[in-house]
Amino acid sequence: MAKEHETSVQPWCTLEELLLACAVNRYGTKNWDSIAMEISNRTASVYRSPDNCKDRFDELKRRFISRNDDDESTMVDELKKIRVEELRREVVGVEGEEIGGRKRDELERRKRR
C-alpha cells in the first residue's frame, strides 16, 4: 500500500519527532527534502513533506530549546527519554497479557530457575 500524502491529518508520534531531530542534526536546516525522505523511508506513517518537517522542527525548537541554549542535542536527548518511557509502558502492558500462550507468572518462574 502506498503512503498517503495527507500531512496535516495525522499527528506526529514521538518516534517521528526523534527521527526528525536526528535527521536535522545529520543534514542541517537547509536540506528539508533529504530530511523528509529519511523520515518517510524509516517509518510506516503518512508522508511528511519538506515544509511539514520544517514546521514541525520549528515547533520542537520552541518546545525543547531554551532561549539561552541553542544546542539541538538537548532536544534529541529529551525526545529519546520520552520514547524510552513510551516503550517501557508498552512492555509493561505486554507483560501483563499472555505472551505466546504463557502467562506472566509462568515466565517469571522460568527466569528464576
Image (cartoon, rainbow, N blue to C red):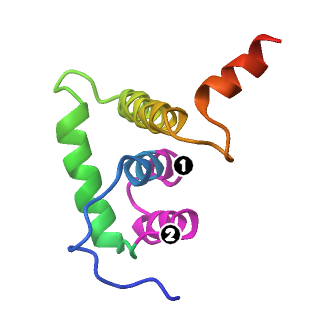
> What's the residue type where badge 2 is placed?
Ala
Q: Residue at x 38, y 85 (%)?
A: 4
- What percent of the width, then of the height, locates residue 107? 69, 27
> What's the residue type where badge 1 is placed?
Arg
Which label number is shown at residue 44?
2
Q: Residue at x 83, y 12 (%)?
A: 113
Residue closest to the far bottom: 1
Q: Residues within 10 Å of mark 1 (few under 14, many from 20)?
A: few
Task: Tell me how far mark 2 sits from mark 1, CA to CA.
Answer: 21 Å
Q: Is residue 80 left or right of residue 49?
A: right
Which label number is shown at residue 82?
none
Disc 1 marks which residue? 26
- Is 35 magenta? The answer is yes
Quick one: SS at disc 1? helix
Instruction: Evaluate if marks 2 and 1 touch, with contact meaning CB atoms under 8 Å apart.
Output: no
Disc count in the image?
A: 2
Q: Residues within 10 Å of mark 2 (few under 14, many from 20)?
A: few
User: Vertical placement of 10 versus 55: above or below?
Assistant: below
Mark sitting earlier along the chain (2/1): 1
Magenta segment: 22-45
User: Vertical placement of 65 versus 45: above or below?
Assistant: above
Eye-nearest disc, 2 or 1? 2
